[in-house]
Amino acid sequence: MANPLLQAINLTKRYGQFTALSNLNIKIVGPKCVGFLGPNGAGKTTTLKLFTDMIRPTYGHALINGVDVHKNKKIALSMVGTLIETPEVYPSLTEKEALFMIAEIKGVPHKFLERSVKEVVNKVKMKRWLDQKVGKMSKGMKQRINIAAALLGDPDIILLDEPTSGLDPRGMSEVREIIKDLKKEKKLIFMSSHLLSEVSEICDEVALINHGKLMAYGPINEVTSRFSNGRTAIIEVSTIRPLQSSVIKRIRKINGVRGVDILDTKRFNLRLFGGIDAQQKLLESLVKLRIGVISFKPSASALEETYLSVFKETV
Ligand SMILES: Nc1ncnc2c1ncn2[C@@H]1O[C@H](COP(=O)(O)OP(=O)(O)O)[C@@H](O)[C@H]1O
Ligand SMILES: [Mg+2]
């Protein structure tokens, strides 16, 4: 399968005099999860709606795998799964009935209906409730069915608008786990969120939008170091084994390290002076120390600092 590709060219949406989205140019290539972050009213939902032709652009193009959504809606939409503005699934139908109906609407061939529904239900871990009425389910379960519906037809691009919004902590965590699983299936996931910790946890890249303008797009550590302006970057490191205090002393001595904040026995934050080159050297040094590094990523607080500096006038 070719690399999934989501692209906007000069994509603009005006409502009268008001510009909700201004000349968006972005090209997202390959399987990955991209967080779309910005304050309320920034233009996130507008962008996602333009990518699904729910609204028309004033000018510019929204492309799904190179196909203009507005010009070739049917072909473009067959390659994308969307969850925008949480639709109410039919409360009087069972989960199975609802998904069969949506699969039919989406044009899944008859002979594949059963198998397609089974597959997506497994992906969102909702098999046990197939015969239960949707109206009786919790918000989190309904949201998992919405995601299942987006996955019908096996699209390689998934657009999600604040997928965990309004859910309780368990519901949020279940939805995040589903998104992490989708990443393993080589999907391109573009999800809006206003939760920095969520984007840090599950996304590889981040796009920042404010007042309808794209402020930055790139890998999270690149974006955070770009805005840290030579200030300190914060990297969260997890290890497979608990850390010995002797090792922590050695970590403190690594070039560029400004400080170590212990989060728990197998997790610490490193405050680091310098950009991504410094981060790369730091990771090499940590690996040499054989502490069993299993993850190395900008901490949620690094993204928070970037967010606050980009959006300072609105916060
Ligand atoms: N149908 C509409 N008519 C006029 N203004 C709109 C309409 N839809 C959205 N907007 C405005 O466009 C801006 C962007 O909205 P939206 O994309 O929903 O923001 P976000 O999802 O980032 O919170 C907001 O200021 C909103 O009020
Ligand atoms: Mg929105």
Image: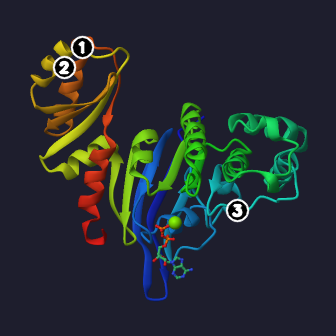
Report the number of discs. 3
Q: Are marks 3 and 2 in contact (CB under 8 Å)?
A: no
Q: Crowdedness of circle 2 by 10 Å Cα count: few (<14), some, many (20+)?
A: some
Mark 1 sits on what residue?
A: 244
**For residue 182, what is the image quadrant?**
top right
Mark 2 sits on what residue?
A: 248
Q: Are marks 1 and 2 in contact (CB under 8 Å)?
A: yes
Residue 34 horizontal side relative to residue 263, left or right: right
Mark 1: amino acid: Gln
39 and 280: which is toward the camera: 39
Quadrant into which the C terminus falls: bottom left
**Marks 3/2: CA distance?**
50 Å
Residue appearing at x 38%, y 63% in the figure: 209
Q: Position of residue 101 (x, y in %)?
A: 86, 53
**For residue 109, what is the image quadrant?**
top right
Residue appearing at x 73%, y 34% in the figure: 122
Q: Position of residue 166 (x, y in %)?
A: 58, 58
**Marks 1/2: CA distance?**
7 Å
User: Is the CB atom of the residue marked by disc 3 within 8 angstroms of ligand 2's nearest atom?
Assistant: no
Mark 2: amino acid: Ile
Q: Which mark is residue 217?
A: none
Q: Crowdedness of circle 3 by 10 Å Cα count: few (<14), some, many (20+)?
A: few
Q: Are marks 1 and 3 in contact (CB under 8 Å)?
A: no
Residue 238 horizontal side relative to residue 66, left or right: left
Residue 40 horizontal side relative to residue 157, left or right: left
Q: Position of residue 30 (x, y in %)?
A: 48, 40
Whether residue 237 is visible: yes
Vertical arrangement, residue 289 with respect to residue 274, above or below? above
Quadrant into which the N terminus falls: top right
Mark 3 sits on what residue?
A: 87
7 and 267: which is toward the camera: 267
Where disc 3 sits, the SS reads loop
